[in-house]
Amino acid sequence: MRTNYKDDFPLLKNSTAGGKPLVYLDNAATTQKPAQVIEAVKEYYEQYNANPHRGAYPLSEKATEVYEAAREKAAEFIGADSPEEIVFTKGTTESLNLVASSYGLDNIREGDEILISIEEHHSNLIPWQAVAKTRNARLRYLYTDENGKLPLEEISAKINARTKIVAVTQVSNVLGIVNPLGEIVRRAREVGAVVVLDAAQSIPHMPVDVRALDVDFLAFSGHKLYAPTGIGVLYGKKEHLRKMQPLLFGGGMVDDVSEQDATFAEGPSKFEGGTQNVEGAVGLHAAIDYLEGIGYERIGQIESELTQYALTRFHSIPHVTVYGKESGNNRAGIISFNIDGAHPHDVSTILSADNVAIRSGHHCAHPLMRHMGVNATCRVSLCFYNTRDDIDILIESICKVREVLGLELK
Ligand code: PMP
């Protein structure tokens, strides 16, 4: 069985600093790209670059064909009923803003409740604040417990007859913990609320099937899924997309335009005003093919074993606090931690001297940081191309931090 996937990723193979190999552990921010994706994008520019859905000549037809083939692939990948339910966007942020503006503003009334969790990334939080403020609605939160989990009682208590939208992340980008989505959807269905799922941190690590999950909307970013930046997906049930107004007006999204009025295209084109990111769609298609070639089963096996190994090593070092208590099986490979007496930015700077790349800061989750009572954390996020050697180098580097900062070692 194949164990080392780094060879597929040119940047990982070629990147050394001062003779030290790159240990890339910031995959929750963005993933590296396999040669297959880079090649697919290169081929697009070398062989069939044109504006899709515009020209009646072979190149434009080919561009249309690859763009729409990517839509079909994305639909099949997440188990959508049809490609008509896939809107291409810039990424998760744009997808969530589109739902909030086009669905939220039209369906939320004064006194209604929108429910999100305290773990949300700002992109699944600020758009709902805006809707709540504009419509005089109430934005409520599901709070995590001291272990970083969403208690089931929170879910049954907070979802009530006034709840119209429940927008949650499947996996926290800070704690890595997988949320009890089944329970959230079940309760939302009981009260007739719409469920919006932020799958940015789940889809790189586990199969996500919109029919099985029974969500109304789902958002993810290509760049966290080994695809290029600037491409993302908004899945929406057809019955919702059909009724929603476009967010961007311009070329490619209309049926007819008169001097004073316009009618809009049917299907996802309605939300895709302007020239689209064909390169990104082609890269996303190649990334999904690449991932399917490995398979989620294998990805899950590697990542949960590696996460468990990393957690065990973390728990063995003094002066380190790991946030969120879950084993490697019920969390994606995201581990947030702090070292006593060391600012997270200092930690990541010290680690980077060993060519170890991690993230430090608030991770675009200010409310969660406040809820946890911290200003910032260090975050390690791994994926299937990482190895035990990467974790060993990371831990060795972490063990040096207090010494470098002149702090007591025991
Ligand atoms: N949601 C979550 C859970 C995320 O981790 C991120 C990216 N950090 C986003 C949304 C936003 O994704 P993007 O910046 O690609 O739009």
Image (cartoon, rainbow, N blue to C red):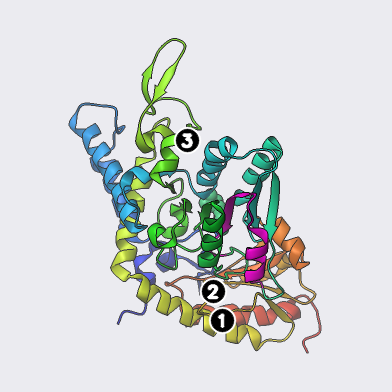
Q: Quadrant of the C terminus?
A: bottom right
Amino acid type, callout 1: Ser
Residue type pointed to by label 3: Met
Say whether residue 208 is magenta: no
User: Is the residue under label 2 in contact with that under label 1 (CB below 8 Å)?
Assistant: yes
**Residue 181 placement (x, y as % from top left):** 52, 65
Q: Nearer the viewer, mark 2 or mark 3?
A: 3
* Crowdedness near tag 1: few (<14), some (14–19) or many (≥20) residues, C-alpha within 10 Å: some
Mark 3 → mark 1, Cα distance in angstroms: 41 Å
Q: Residue at x 63, y 52 (%)?
A: 161
Q: Which picture quadrant has residue 214? A: bottom left
Seen in the picture, residue 193 relative to 274 is either above or below; the reply is below
Which mark is first along the chain, 1 or 3? 3
Label 2 sits on residue: 331
Q: Nearer the viewer, residue 34 or 277?
A: 277
Mark 3 vs mark 1: give the one in front.
Answer: 3
Question: Splitting the image into four quadrants, where does ligand 1 fall?
Answer: bottom right
Residue 166: x and y in percent read: 58, 53
Residues in magenta, as a range: 148-171
Q: CA distance from mark 2 to mark 3?
A: 35 Å
Q: Which mark is residue 355?
A: none
The three-letter code of the residue at mark 2 reads Arg
- The answer to whether residue 41 shows anywhere in this view is no
Residue 327 shows which numbered tag?
1
Residue at x 45% of width, y 68% of height = 205
Q: Residues within 10 Å of mark 3 (few under 14, many from 20)?
A: some
Question: Could you tell me which residue is drawn at 22 percent across and 38 percent down?
Answer: 62
Given residues 406 and 264, the one toward you in this image is 264
